[in-house]
Image (cartoon, rainbow, N blue to C red):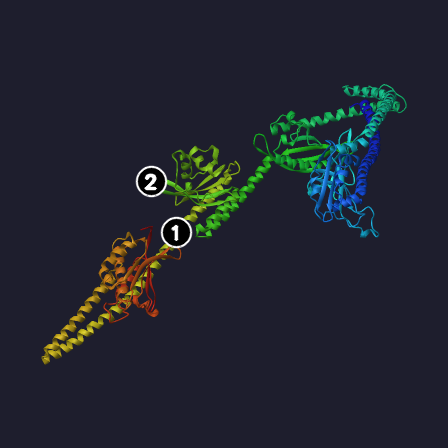
Amino acid sequence: MTLRRSVLLFTGGMILIMGLISSAFMWQLMTDALSDLEEAYVHQEVEATLFYIREDLASLKRVGGDWAPWDDTRDFMMGEDEDYVRNNLDDWTFSNLGTDFMVFYDGSGDLFYSRAFDPTNREVVSAPEFLLNLAKDDPLLAHSSPEDAMTGIIAGPEGLLMVSSHPITKSQWRDPISETVISGTLIVGHHLDEARVEELGSLTGLALRMEPLAPAREMRDLTRQIPSLLIETADEETIIASKVIEDIYGKPTILFEASLPRDIHQSGMEIVHRMELALVLFSLFFGGFILFFLERILLEPLTAITSSVEAIGRTEDPQGVHVPMVGRGELLILVESINEMLNHLDAYNQQLKMSERRFRAVFETAQDCIFIKDREGRYVQANPVMERIFGMPVSAVLGNKDEVLFNPETAAQIREQDAQVLSGDPFVGEVSTDTRGGSSVTFHVAKVPLRDNRGQVTGICGIARDITYIKDAEIELQKRDRLLSASAIASYTLLVNYDIDRIIIDVLQILGEAVEVDRAYIFENQTADGEVFMSQHYEWTKGDLEPQINNPDLQRLPYHPDSSNFYDAISGGRSYGGLVKDLPQPERAHLEPQGIISILIVPIFVEDRLWGFIGFDDCHRERFWSDGEISVIQMAAGSIGGAIIRSRTRKDLVGARDELERKIDEVEAKNAEMERFVYTVSHDLKSPLVTVQGFVGFLREDISEGDVDRVETDLAMIEEAVVNMDHLLKDTLELSRIGRVTSPPEDVSFGDIVRETLDRFSAEIGSRGVEVVLAESWPKVRVDRLRIQEVLMNLIENGLKYMGDEANPKIEIGWLRRDGDETIFFIRDNGIGIEADQQEKVFDLFYQLDPDTEGSGVGLAIVKRIIEVHNGRIWIESEVGSGTTVFFTLPTVEAKS
């Protein structure tokens, strides 16, 4: 915007603003005065109208005051003047008095007589219903003295009524007045209808509206909103005044509303508009005079000076060009100063050109990036080296900010550095970024602030040297050192720990963190039917990355024919990997769902055989492993292979040792059992031999004495002892055969074995009335079926044998689960029970609870041996007199019958 336009706009604007302020002030002043005047006028007119209403009520009061204290009226109420109505209450009387109705109540508060006249239709009508049904305690009827009177307006169902109520007495009151007898009440009045209201308004020239307030709640709301007089503007021509009037009972139930023309407001506003017009005309005249003066004295010389300076600025070589001498006073001094300044600029420009040529020579030939930025961070100058490094023309860089060359993170970092330089402090440091070609570049940067002649920072000058090759070498050395250290730690950990399953995850974590990957894992190969499979056995993951150790797709995974390169590489001892997107489709199908971007596989050999491989996944970036990293990881893979060999060897040795110890324990247990068995057999077999030996001696004596009867007895006893010895030898032989002579185990429902066994005891169970309770369902067991039948036969037989004198004998056979998934079978009876100290002895060889009972005492020993051969256990829970429960366990399978 030119100076002339600015001065003209400013001057015109100031004059306009002053005019508007003056106009607004005058407007406010006049409107406030008019509002006050209009409000006073409204109060005056409303009070005048209310005065006429009060005069109307006073007229009614005078009528009532004349007719009520009149002897004829009193005699009429007492029934003494029958011509009162004909002589007094005719049409002429109502018209002359200005009333519409008269209502007479006797001294008891009962309606005595009423008469009403319609002045419009000139006919007798019914008095207002409201006045004909007054309550006896209504204030209109409750007169305490002859002087009492009530005058006012009633808001009845028929509309507004103006009434006056007076006590009916004689014309002459007694002295004192209180002794004057009141014979009733006279109520006179007329309707305050629209015609009457309009008539009242015509007296003051107002448009009136009077109406009763409807429900009590609305009345309360309106009376709160309307004070003594509420004045509201309806429009530019009308103003409305509202007032709530109390009825004859003193209640605010009547709304008085008057509409007045706004003559005062309209006249006043016409005057205001004329004054505003005069002010506008004066402002225009004054403004034009000021603008003319400024144009001739100031603006024309300044325009000439400005045009000359602009022409000099557009000249390519302004040397020797000057501003013409125009104006007077200060303007002339300004022209002379400008010309002197131009002379100094000519000399200074010559020096700048020389300096510019020297700077340009350095700028164009330097091997480092040189750039200049303004305060907003836009590149002002950049040398050709930046084009070579960033692959972008310098013309595309100039005028743009760092975002055109760097990613958002690097650009934000550079802005922080530039803020430091713009504050006046130089910056020296390093910046790393990715170029448009995708390669990573590191610069050593030095920046200094550029200042003007006043010392103010105007921009930034910087030099950046590409030190990428140096940083890459440092990073590679650091990675190799870190990886070598991790490999050494992993190798040492594998060397000093034999339990590879316990420490292999720690080894994977050490290697994974050193290589900076997201996942490290180990796969082992298996061979089935000549085909090689791989299965994941160990895994370490970083952070919140989802583990794949439980992924069923990574178990028994075959090497695809299309992945021959992969298998050939690792079986040949070479690593395999790269970017997943570049691998064959079958391999990508397994790797991409896991979110893997880059992968490295290094084989693990055990005893010169491909045992499996160790793998590393990067799920966040594309990367390529260096030869140094791969060689170190191959060393670690070799350490893992050696640890696997050591772990296998140790497991084999530990297994052999454990097996040897188990065999020794079995031999020792069998020897101990054999000693007990030999002792028990020798002890129990000795008893029938002693019997035989004794009765052989008796037999000799009886033969020598010729006692034939005694000889037969001796032979019977010897025969019985031989039979007992035969039973003992058979039972002992049977016990020794258990575990050595067995039938192949079969999967059978335990319920089938129970039912087959019970069939053998059906006759005895039925004859003795024994109740048998069986479980509803049964698990399957993997057992020698005949041996388990033998167990059940022994246990059921013992239950029947030791049932005692129980009136309701019962045997229950079932099963339950305890301690997790262990299945326990039981046979429970309600017989005589077993004492606690005998519950383990009953399983000993030849042990009998009752020596007088039949049997050899071998049955429960055989039962225990059969259960133990099935890797089970057996025990008894019993209370004397409450029965016995025998529990035992057997190997089960899943299905139930």
Q: Residue furthest right?
A: 329
Q: Nearer the viewer, residue 255 or 466?
A: 255
Q: Amino acid at mark 1?
A: Thr
Q: Which mark is residue 530?
A: 2
Q: Nearer the viewer, residue 795 or 699?
A: 795
Q: Residues within 10 Å of mark 2 (few under 14, many from 20)?
A: few
- Is residue 851 something one can see in this rendering? yes
- Is residue 322 something one can see in this rendering? no
Compared across the picture, whether 285 is left or right of 837 comes to right
Which residue carries the number 1 mark?
A: 649
Compared across the picture, whether 15 is left or right of 598 comes to right
Residue 318 appears at what percent x and percent y?
79, 20
- The answer to whether residue 278 is above or below residue 887 is above
Mark found first going from the N terminus, 2 or 1: 2
Residue 186 appears at what percent x and percent y?
76, 43
Q: Residues within 10 Å of mark 1 (few under 14, many from 20)?
A: few
Element marked by disc 1: helix
Residue occupying the point 80% across, 50% down: 180
Q: Amino acid at mark 2?
A: Gly
Give the quarter of the image for residue 356: top right
Q: Which mark is residue 544?
A: none
Position of the N terminus, as image quadrant, is: top right
